[in-house]
Amino acid sequence: ISYTQNSGIPSQIRFWNVSSQAWSGEQLANDTVNGTGGTEKLYNKVCTAPNRREAVIITTPNQAVSVKPTFSAQIFNGTGIVENSNFSVDAAPITPANARMIGCAYEEQSKRAIVVWAADATADNFNYTIWNGTSWSAVGKAIDPDPATEEYTIRLVPNPRSNETLFVT
């Protein structure tokens, strides 16, 4: 799980150990702006792989005062964080109004993780990247089918019988 205890405190991460039937100690989520530990987070999202001990942990910092609008996608491999990548939001800082404009899910057949996020302040365009178990793909572009509407949340729903994933805003 990933959570923020209080305003101004960085996100904490804890993992359930099936063997010992106990939670791990708290670990600081990687800071998307300054490195490990650090800034207050607005939103945390965790997506788990359907066939292995792996999870994508997304954290978004409170960037109303931040220098660059980024979020972090971290990979947990069952024992710790093995990959941490920062992705940019092109036009505006991440604020409480748009912090949930990031979604993730694992494809059911290939078991790859997909992360989708709003590429601009009006959420008219979206970016995505795919984790193949080893590395992130280059960032791709997706177009909003209804650019006249401003969305505030993203949900990805994988089809259990294919690699198709429904993208809902």
Image (cartoon, rainbow, N blue to C red):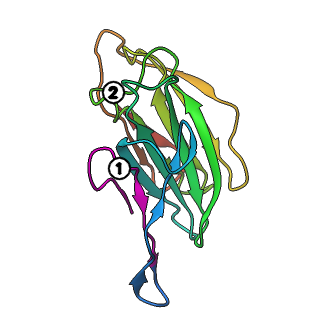
Q: Which residue occupies the foreground of this view, 108 or 9?
A: 9
Going by the numbered disc 1, the residue's amino acid type is Ile
The percent position of residue 105, horizontal first and vertical second, equals: 47, 49
Q: Residue at x 49, y 56 (%)?
A: 161
Specify the label residue 95 is tagged with.
Answer: 2
Secondary structure at badge 2 equals: loop
Predominant SS along the magenta part:
loop
The percent position of residue 45, horizontal first and vertical second, equals: 40, 49
Relative vertical location of residue 146 with respect to residue 65 in this rendering, above or below:
above
Start and end of the magenta stretch?
A: 1-16
Circle 1 packing at 10 Å, graded few (<14), some (14-19), many (20+), is some
Q: Which residue occupies the foreground of this view, 156 or 88?
A: 88
Specify the label residue 149 is tagged with.
Answer: none
The percent position of residue 80, horizontal first and vertical second, equals: 59, 67
Q: Residue at x 44, y 74 (%)?
A: 25
As measured in the structure, the alpha-carbon distance from the residue carrying label 1 to the one carrying label 2 is 16 Å
Specify the quadrant of the image occupied by residue 87: top right
Is 156 displayed left or right of 30 in the figure?
left
Q: Residue at x 47, y 42 (%)?
A: 165
Q: Which residue in the structure is indicated by mark 1?
A: 9
Question: In this view, which residue lies farthest toward the bottom?
Answer: 20
Instruction: Look at the image and tell me whether residue 163 can be seen.
Output: no
Question: In this view, which residue lies farthest toward the right?
Answer: 134
Q: Which residue occupies the foreground of this view, 131 or 110?
A: 131
Quadrant, the N terminus:
bottom left
Earlier along the polypeptide chain: callout 1 or callout 2?
Answer: 1
Relative vertical location of residue 103 with respect to residue 89 in this rendering, above or below:
below
Q: Which residue occupies the foreground of this view, 116 or 33?
A: 33
The percent position of residue 144, horizontal first and vertical second, equals: 42, 19
Quadrant, the C terminus:
top left
Q: Residue at x 47, y 31 (%)?
A: 117
Question: In this view, which residue lies farthest toward the top?
Answer: 148
